[in-house]
Image (cartoon, rainbow, N blue to C red):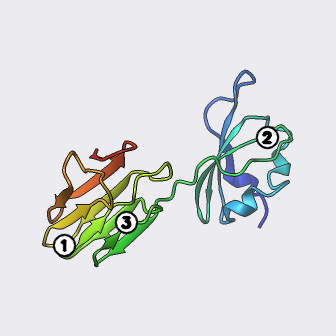
Amino acid sequence: MAFNQDNFAPVGAISTASPSVYSYITTDDTATVTASDYFEDKSFQLNANDIILSQTSDGFSILEVSSSGTVSSPVTQSRPAIEVVTATGSVSVVTDIEIATGAITRTLPAITAAVKPVTIRNIGAVAITIDTPDSAEIEENTDASLSAGESYTLAPDGTDWWII
């Protein structure tokens, strides 16, 4: 598809002294929206460093307008990766939310620069054990127990995991 003016709008007041923010929604995907000349119809209005909050068919992105009036690759892609699990195994480094059930053990990823916080939700009737693959600890313990109906968001600090 092509750019649709009806789906493009400023967010708040427009200022020449600071970047402006716009919103845009489309059924196009992010790759199409970030292609050269997609926002060509708005080139008279867009300035370098303006921000476009873009809801596309494959997620929400924050786009920055470059000096040439085109947009950059997404600054963020914020649709969470959700995984449903029913067996003992490892939490993927790309998972944001894990929904688990059963008498299982879920092992957190090894802590590296690429590891991010993860939320684990127990939708079952029995406790789930959360473990680490190395010497890292969870709240200064070797593992954690997640009771039925509970959820934890765990974040690494570079060495250990913490429930936040």
Amino acid type at circle 2 is Ser
Percent of width and height locating residue 124: 19, 72
| Quadrant (top left/top right/bottom left/bottom right) for the N terminus | bottom right
Query: What residue does disc 1 label?
Result: 124
Q: Amino acid at mark 1?
A: Gly
Tag 1–tag 2 contact (CB < 8 Å): no
| Disc nearest the viewer among 2 and 3 | 3
> Along the horizontal axis of the image, is 3 left or right of 128?
right
Q: Report the front residue among 61 and 91.
A: 91
Q: Residue at x 79, y 35 (%)?
A: 47
Q: Residues within 10 Å of mark 3 (few under 14, many from 20)?
A: many
Q: Residue furthest top?
A: 17
**Residue for point 30% across, 61% down:** 120
Q: Which sits earlier in the primary sequence, circle 3 or circle 1?
A: 3
The residue to which callout 3 is attached is: 91
| In the rendered image, the vertical position of residue 103 relative to residue 159, given as above or below | below
Residue 93 x, y percent position in the rendering: 45, 61
Q: Does residue 161 appear left or right of residue 56 in this picture?
A: left
- How far apart marks 3 and 1 lie (CA) works out to 17 Å
Q: Quadrant of residue 143?
A: bottom left
Question: Which quadrant of the structure image shows residue 17?
Answer: top right
Residue 105 sits in quarter: bottom left
* Helix, strand or loop at mark 1: loop
Q: Are marks 3 and 1 in contact (CB under 8 Å)?
A: no
Residue labelled with disc 2: 66
Q: Earlier in the sequence, mark 1 or mark 2?
A: 2
> In the displayed structure, would residue 11 be above or below residue 100?
above
Furthest residue in direction front, as rendered: 135
